[in-house]
Image (tube, rainbow, N blue to C red):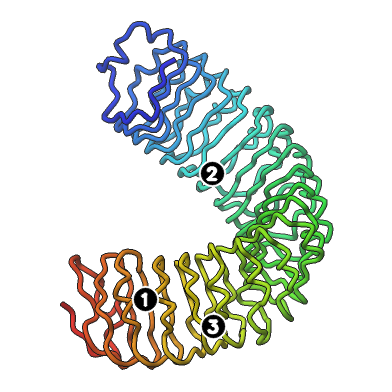
Amino acid sequence: MLNLSDSCLHGQLNSKISIFRLQNLRFLTTLDLSNNDFIGKIPSSLGNFYMLTTLDLSRNHFSGEIPSSLGNLSKLATLELSSNHFGGEIPASLGNLSKLTTLHLSHNNFTGRIPSSLGNLLNLTNLSLCANNFIGEIPSSFGIFFSHLTSLSLCENNFGGEIPTSLGSLSHLTVLDLSQKNFVGEIPFSFGSLKTLTSLSVENNKLSGNFPLMLLNLRKLTELSLYGNKYVGKLPLNISLLSNLEFFYVSGNAFTGTTPSSLFSIPSLAYVDLSNNQLNGTLELGNISLSPKIEDLRLGNNNFMGSIPRSISKLSNLERLDLSHLNTQGCSFPEFIPTQRNMKKLDISNNLIKGQVPGWLRKLPVLQYVNVSSNTLVGFGSPTNHGVTLSYLFTANNNLTGKILSFICALRSLAILDLSNNKLNGSFPLCVGNFNSVLQTLNVRQNCLSGRLPEIITESIRWLDVGHNQLVGKVMQFTKPVLSLRSWGVSSGIRATLT
């Protein structure tokens, strides 16, 4: 065994360097050069190491084509070439590696079709071809010859056509990733036979039809992603049959009807994304206390009616909550949020929520992102010294009045601040000029601010819009070139100088 992974090695491999001249390496069984900075082509002389059972060149910067000589490594069980810059087509000679169990070629620049010779790899258990430029259809022979496969990842390529029915014959499969392609049609009915499957992702395709009910037979599923397709109809009421489900992503489809209350009775459920559909009716979450592990709940961009359910307060582990773009018809700010001590990201924008942004919101100890834009909020609650973890604050398109409160000064981690399209007046807090290291975006456009703008001297800022106010003074000082004045939003409604 020769393990030189993570050794800060760099340069090119060629047959003249010492590791290829050592005669003892003829009996080498494992060669691991992963996670270094090697560049260039891999030498064809690697095909002379006939005793190799493991070859790992992953996470380098190798380029060029795979030398056909690797097909001579008849004892090879693991070939790991992922995360490089290899190109061209997969050499047909790899089909000679009859003992191969693991083949990882993901995150390269391979092109062409999958060679039929790979069908000779009858012992293959793990195949990953993700993030390349393969074309054509998935060979139907995959479901015939690869009977031992436990993991098949073909994501992020240019495959098209329909998903082969034969994949339903892969009875040992636990992971199947067919995401981010151009697949059309429906998930084959044969997938209902994949009883060992724990993870299925077909996201970002062009699949259509109703929810594929045969998937309810896959009782070992922990992850199901149908995100970004063209599914319609209702979600199944008996979705709780998937009793081991942890991740359920169906965002970006056209599902209708109400949320199936049984979904929130699955004890293992942790991540739920139902956003960007056409779900309607009263937002019902059933006995959500039966799913105490939920960390991420996204329900935004649907057609729900009524108020935001208080039962969400029972989710003590909640880290992300998206309730944006719902038809809440002018309800008040959700009062259960102070109990969410683990909340990191909150989006309740576009809901016509009235009243004030409560002061207690900034007491949440790990809160990083808040979006309350496009509501009918009129101001901020009592200032607090908490909220120092907040990095993103969006309050645009409300009816906020009065001055920009000094609590902004305590937000030293603030990267984006958007107060645009409100009715704020008075002068700008001087402390904004102290956000030297992290502030990237500042937008106060379309307010009634007046007086002198604090000098903003920062290397990090990427977008500044103070237009349509009555501010005067210097806009910024930079030591590096910046975007055009038009991009910086100082072309209208402000008298300013640049230095």
Quadrant showing the N terminus: top left
Considering depth in this image, is 165 or 53 the residue closer to the camera? 53
Looking at the rendering, which quadrant does residue 235 occupy?
bottom right
Looking at the rendering, which quadrant does residue 194 occupy?
top right
Do residues under tags 1 and 2 come within 8 Å of each other at their CB atoms?
no
Q: CA distance from mark 3 to mark 1?
A: 17 Å
Q: Residue at x 79, y 64 (%)?
A: 260
Q: Identify the residue under disc 1.
A: 442
Q: Identify the residue under disc 3.
A: 374
Q: Residue 106 got which mark?
A: none
Across and down, in percent, residue 10 comes to 28, 30
Q: Is residue 248 left or right of residue 213?
A: left
Considering depth in this image, is 63 or 418 the residue closer to the camera? 418
Q: Earlier in the sequence, mark 1 or mark 2?
A: 2
Q: CA distance from mark 1 to mark 2?
A: 46 Å
Across and down, in percent, residue 409 comes to 39, 75
Q: Is residue 200 left or right of residue 136?
A: right
The amino acid type found where label 3 is placed reads: Ser
Q: Residue furthest front?
A: 385
Across and down, in percent, residue 25 comes to 38, 10
The amino acid type found where label 1 is placed reads: Leu
Considering depth in this image, is 202 or 375 the residue closer to the camera? 375
Q: Residue at x 70, y 46 (%)?
A: 222
